[in-house]
């Protein structure tokens, strides 16, 4: 089928692999910030968590924009869409995780793996085709 071949192409594309690697970098940056703020600087864990997530998502945005998708779009247009895409993908992640654990009685680790995979794939699609897709490069430069 056509959609299956397109799906296969997306998963095997360099941008998908780079997206996943950037996700690992994003996690390292975020957790490093969280742990440093808590254990070195004595910052409240909730504030540390917020700053860590902000640092991670900003790292993800910059690396995906300039390294992965090489977007020429303007940050003031792309960043809000990127953040909104993150919120949507993360919300779906939570719904999938909760549903698998609470309604389908799957183990938490199975739920986390499936929910994380869903999040990654949705966020990649949004980043690739919505956030960093230069449909009108003359308008957004």
Image (cartoon, grey):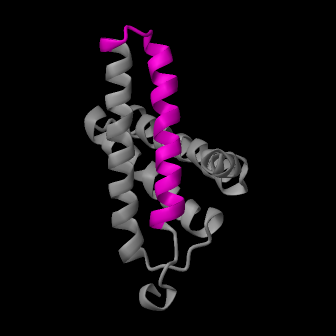
Task: Say whether residue 103 is magenta.
Answer: yes
Q: Main secondary structure of the magenta part?
A: helix
Q: Where 22 falls versus 35 (above or below)?
A: below
Instruction: Give the residue displayed 37% in from the left and 28% down from the top.
Output: 96
Instruction: Choose between 12 and 112: the one closer to the eye.
Output: 12
Q: Residue furthest bottom?
A: 138
Locate the N terminus by quadrant. top right
Instruction: Give the residue displayed 51% in from the left and 86% down from the top.
Output: 137
Instruction: Give the residue displayed 53% in from the left and 47% down from the top.
Output: 26
Instruction: Choose between 1 and 106: the one closer to the eye.
Output: 1
Q: Where 113 falls versus 109 (above or below)?
A: below
Task: Say whether residue 91 is magenta.
Answer: no
**Residue 98 image-quadrant placement:** top left
Instruction: Give the residue displayed 36% in from the left and 14% down from the top.
Output: 101
Q: Residue furthest front?
A: 1
Please indicate whether residue 14 sits to the left or right of residue 136 in the image: right
Q: Position of residue 86 (x, y in %)?
A: 38, 50
Q: Position of residue 56 (x, y in %)?
A: 46, 49
Q: Position of residue 83 (x, y in %)?
A: 36, 57
Question: Which residue range is magenta in the image?
Answer: 102-131
Q: Where 124 falls versus 35 (above or below)?
A: below
């Amino acid at each position: 089928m056509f959609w299956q071949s397109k799906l296969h192409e997306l998963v095997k594309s360099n941008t998908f692999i780079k997206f996943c690697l950037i996700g690992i970098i994003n996690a390292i940056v975020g957790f490093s910030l969280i742990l440093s703020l808590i254990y070195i600087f004595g910052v409240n864990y909730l504030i540390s968590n917020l700053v860590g997530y902000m640092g991670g998502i900003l790292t993800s945005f910059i690396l995906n924009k300039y390294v992965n998708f090489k977007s020429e779009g303007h940050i003031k247009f792309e960043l809000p869409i990127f953040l909104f895409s993150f919120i949507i993908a993360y919300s779906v992640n939570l719904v999938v995780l909760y549903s698998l654990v609470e309604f389908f009685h799957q183990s938490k680790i199975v739920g986390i793996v499936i929910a994380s995979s869903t999040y990654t794939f949705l966020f990649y699609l949004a980043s690739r085709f919505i956030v960093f897709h230069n449909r009108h490069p003359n308008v957004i430069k």
